Amino acid sequence: MMRRIEALDGVVGVIIGRSYGGKSLAQGSRTGAIRIQRKVPGGLKAVTQSAKGLQEIFIRTRADMEDEITARILELE
């Protein structure tokens, strides 16, 4: 999923953050599921479901493309 996000037009990069083992996005969430949490200066804060728990990610975007990129990420799932 990370490589697919990085390949989107307007995405500068994906920075992997803190991991929370044993936690999940929701019951029935599959590995690779992603939830955009909020827009922040420079990009988007999100979490993704990994095999071991939750993984924080920061999606660095070009200016004013956050809404468009959010919609494209939701289409990827």
Image (cartoon, rainbow, N blue to C red):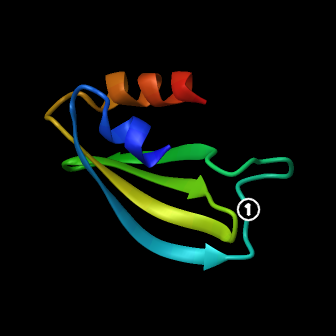
Q: Please provide percent x and percent y for residue 49.
A: 64, 56
Quadrant showing the C terminus:
top right
Q: Which amino acid, by three-letter code, is at mark 1?
A: Ser
Q: How many marks?
A: 1
Residue 75's place in the image compared with 49, above or below, is above
- On the picture, is 50 further left or further right than 18? right
Which quadrant of the structure image shows residue 74? top right
Q: Please provide percent x and percent y for residue 50.
A: 63, 61
Q: Secondary structure at mark 1?
A: loop
Q: Nearer the viewer, residue 50 or 40?
A: 50
The residue beneath circle 1 is: 24
Q: Please provide percent x and percent y for residue 61.
A: 22, 40
Q: Residue furthest right?
A: 27
Residue 37's place in the image compared with 74, above or below, is below
Q: Nearer the viewer, residue 1 or 70?
A: 1
Q: Residue at x 42, y 30 (%)?
A: 70
Q: Please provide percent x and percent y for residue 13.
A: 24, 48
- On the picture, is 58 further left or further right than 10? right
Q: Nearer the viewer, residue 9 or 39?
A: 9
- On the picture, is 5 further left or further right than 25? left
Q: Residue furthest front?
A: 3
Q: Residue at x 34, y 22 (%)?
A: 68
Using a 10 Å C-alpha cutoff, classify the residue at mark 1 as few (fewer than 14 neighbours), some (14 to 19) or many (20 or more): many
Q: Residue at x 54, y 75 (%)?
A: 19
Q: Residue at x 19, y 29 (%)?
A: 64
